[in-house]
Image: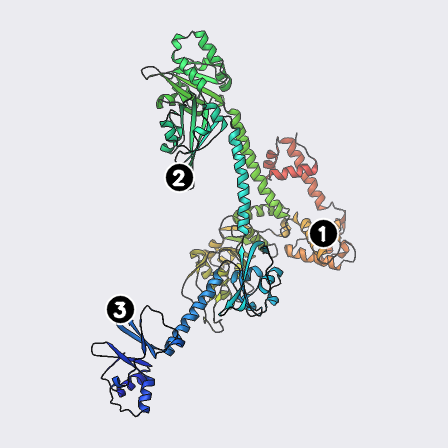
Amino acid sequence: MSLGADHTVGEAAQLLFLRGLETVPVVDSAGSLQGLVSRDTLLQAYCQNLPADMPVREIMSQRFMVLDWEESIPNPEDWEFEAVVVFREGALAGVLDRHSAARIRAFYDRQRSDGIDAAIDAVFTPVLAVDKNGRITILNRHAAYMLDIDPSQALGKRVQQMISHPRILEHLLGEPPPGGQKIGLRGRSFIPYSAPVAWGNDEYIGRVLVLRDVSELEEMARETEYTRKLNQQLEAIIESSFDGLYLTDGQANTLLINRGFERIMGITEAECIGRNMAELVEEGVFSRSGTLQALERQETATITLVASTGKEALVTSTPIYDENGEVVLVVTNVRDITELNELQRMLEHVEGLREREMEAVIESSFDGLYITDGQANTLRLNQGFERIMGITKEQCVGRNMAELVEEGVFSRSGTLLALEKQEPVTITLVASTGKEALVTSTPIFDESGNIMLVVTNVRDITELNDLQRRLDHVEELRQLYETELQQLKLASSRRLVANSPQMRELLNLALRVAAVDSTVLVHGESGVGKELVAELIHSNSKRKDQPFIKINCGAIPETLLESELFGYEAGAFTGASKTGKIGLFELAAGGILFLDEIGELPLNLQVKLLRVLQDREIVRIGGGQPIKVDTRILAGTNRNLQEMVDLKQFRLDLYYRLNVIPIRVPPLRERKEDIPVLANHFLNIFCGKYAMTKRLDRKVMDFLVENLWPGNVRELENLIERLVVTSPGVLIGVEDLPAHFTNKVASGDCELVPLREAVEKTERELLQKAFRLCRSTYEVARVLDINQSTVVRKAAKYGIKSK
C-alpha cells in the first residue's frame, strides 16, 4: 500500500484513517521511494490549515531508515528517525513505525525467553538458580525430580523453605565448600558447579548451581579396573598354555605370541610383534600362514607349516568376528609336529626299512597311529590306537576305510578327507565302541606327487567330551538352582508369602512371563492378591524402571473413567481443564498399566481398549490425532469373563486380546499350606506395628487351617490384626477367636490329629517309599511330580537318605 507523489493530503488522510494505517510510503511513477506520510504528519498539516488538495510531496518526511528483508530491526528506543522502510530483493516490502517495531521485538523477546526456559528444562542435568534475596528463580525438571520438589510450588519461594540439603544451600546462599566434594541425591553422585550471576555494571543479582552426574563415570572406572584384572588373567592363561598361541588383528598384523609358540617354533616375540603375517611369509620366517588362509576363506583353516628354524607345526587359525560380522582377531593354535613329520618322511622310504624297525617305531608312539595306502586300504595300526579306540587290528588291517565307515566301525574318516583334499586334515570321530578321538590325517607323497600313504595320528578325547557333558549338566543344574533361589527369595519377601506348590508354580509362571511383553489376565477371587502378582511381573520385567500404574475400573464412575484412561484435550467438554489432561495410558508410557476389575469396564470403553491393544495408540477425548503409546497391559478380575461374554456383557474379541496369558491366583482354601506361613507373617507385621509381643496357640492355627476363608488373604490379614489388638494375653488362644470359628468345629474335633502333623506324616511316608523304589532324587521328583530341589529339602527335613 503506497501513495504517489501527486496524491493530495485529503487522499492520504482517507488512505491512512479509513484503512487504519500508521504510515505509508510515497513513491514516484517509477516506484522509487520518495518519502513517508504518517498520521502525525497529516494532523500537523490540518493544524496548520494546509489545503486538502495540497500534494503530499510538500509534507512528506525524509526521516526514515532503509533495511533489507534479512536485516535485524534496531531497538525502537534508540531510533532517531520516524520509521523503517523494508525492501525485499530490491522491491518495497513495507513500513514499520516505532510502535509496530516495539511490538515485534517484544514478541521475539518472549519467544527467545520461552525457548531458553524450555532448553534449561530439557537438560538432563539438575539446574537451580536464586536471586540476590535467596528466592528460587530457576528449577528445571531434573532438579525438581532429584530434590522431590514441585516446580510450580517452588519458584519465587525462599530456597530455605523448599530445600533442606545443607550442601546445596551452601552453594546457593554462601561460599561453596573447597575441594569440589560430591553431592548424593537419589542414589546418584553429582559434582556441584556454582557461580554468582551479575548484570549490567557487574551488579550481583543471584547465584546459579549446576549438578553434574558422575555416577556413570564412577561405574566406568570400576568397570575399567575389572577389565584390567581380566586382561591380566587372560595373559596369564595364554602364557600358561603348553600349545603355542599366535594372535593377529583382522589385517594379519601380529599382536601377541606366547612362550609355548617360541618353544615350539624357535621364533622369538621380537621377530614377529607388530609385523604383518604376509611380510613374515615373504621373508621366509614361515613357509606359509594359516592366518592368511583363514582371512581369505573367512573360516577356520588348519595347515602344516615350517619355520625358518626348521621346526614344523600343525596350526589351526580361527577368525573372531565382531557384532557387524567383521574379523577383528585371528587366533592360531600351534602344535609341534616336527617329530611326527619326521616319522612320515621315514614312512616314505618304508620299502627300504626293515619290518622290525618300522614296527618298533610305530608301536613306541603313545598316541594312536593308523596307516593306509594311497587308496585308503589299511596297512597297520599300533597298540596306542587299539587302546584309545577299542578297535583291534583284526577288524581293520587289509580293509578299506570307506568300507569301515559304511559298516559303522568309525563314524567318519580323516583318511578319506585327506585323500579327497590332498592335504592334512584334522577332525573328530566316534568308534563303534563309543570312544571319541581327535585325528589328524596327513597324506605322504612320492617323488611324482602321488599319495602313497596316509598317516593318521589319534588322540583320545572321550574323557574330555565326558567332562564337557558333565560341565553342561552342571550348568543346567546351576540355572535350575538359580531359578529356584529366585523363587525362594520372592517367596520370603516382605509382601509375597508362598509355601504351597500351587503358589510356587504361579510365581514361576509370573517370572517367565515378566521377561516378555505379552498381555496377562490375572484372575481369581477377591482378596487373593492379584495386584501383588501384577507388581511381581512389573518388578521382574525389562520395564521395572518405568512407571507401574494401577486403576480399579469398578471404583471410578463411568463418566470419568474414559477421561482417566485416555485423557482429554483443552475444552473437550464442560468443566474440562483449559490445559487438557494426560490419560493413564500416556502416564504409563514405557511401563505397565494394571487394569484391575476389568470386568466392570463399560462396553463402549471396551471398544476403545481393544483399539489400544491392537494399534498401540490412543485418541484423547476431544482430540483427533492418534497418540502412539508403548504401554504393557495387565488386567485383573474376580469375575468369570467367559460367562460375561456369553451374556453379551463383555466383548469376545477383547476377551481374546486380554487372555493371551491367563494366570489364576488360587483361593486360600485351595492352598492351605500357605495359611500357617501367612498367619505368622501377618502376626510379625502387626506385633511390630503395635509394639506388642504375641504368638498363636497351636490349636488356633488348626482352626485357621480348617476355615474356608471366603475373604481369602485379606480376610486372614484382618483377623490376625484383630486378634493381636483384642487378645488380652501374650498367647492368643481359641477363646480369642470369633464365635463363628469355634462353632464350625464339632465337640469331638479336639481329639483329632492337627492337620500339620497329618500332612508331615503323609509326606514322610511317601518320601520313604519313593526312596526305597527309586535310585536318585531326580527319579523321586519325577514319580511324585515335584521339583528335585523340593525332594532334597524334604528329605533333609525328615532325615531320609537315599540307598
Where residue 406 appears, x then y in whole percent? Answer: 40, 21
Which residue ends up furthest to the right in the rendered image?
A: 729
SS class, disc 2: loop
Name which of mark 3 and mark 1 comes first in the sequence. 3
Q: Nearer the viewer, mark 2 or mark 1?
A: 2
Name which of mark 2 and mark 1 comes first in the sequence. 2
At label 2, which amino acid type do we have?
Glu
> Quadrant location of the N terminus?
bottom left
Report how far apart the C-alphas of labels 2 and 1 lie in the structure: 70 Å
Mark number, residue 10: none
Mark number, residue 89: 3
Could you tell me which residue is drawn at 49 percent across and 73 percent down? Answer: 575
Name which of mark 3 and mark 2 comes first in the sequence. 3
Mark number, residue 703: 1
At label 3, which amino acid type do we have?
Glu
Which residue is under mark 2?
Answer: 326
- Asked whether, in this view, residue 742 is left or right of residue 409, the answer is right
Q: Are marks 3 and 2 in contact (CB under 8 Å)?
A: no
Which residue ends up furthest to the left in the rendered image?
A: 29
- Asked whether, in this view, residue 369 is left or right of residue 677, the answer is left
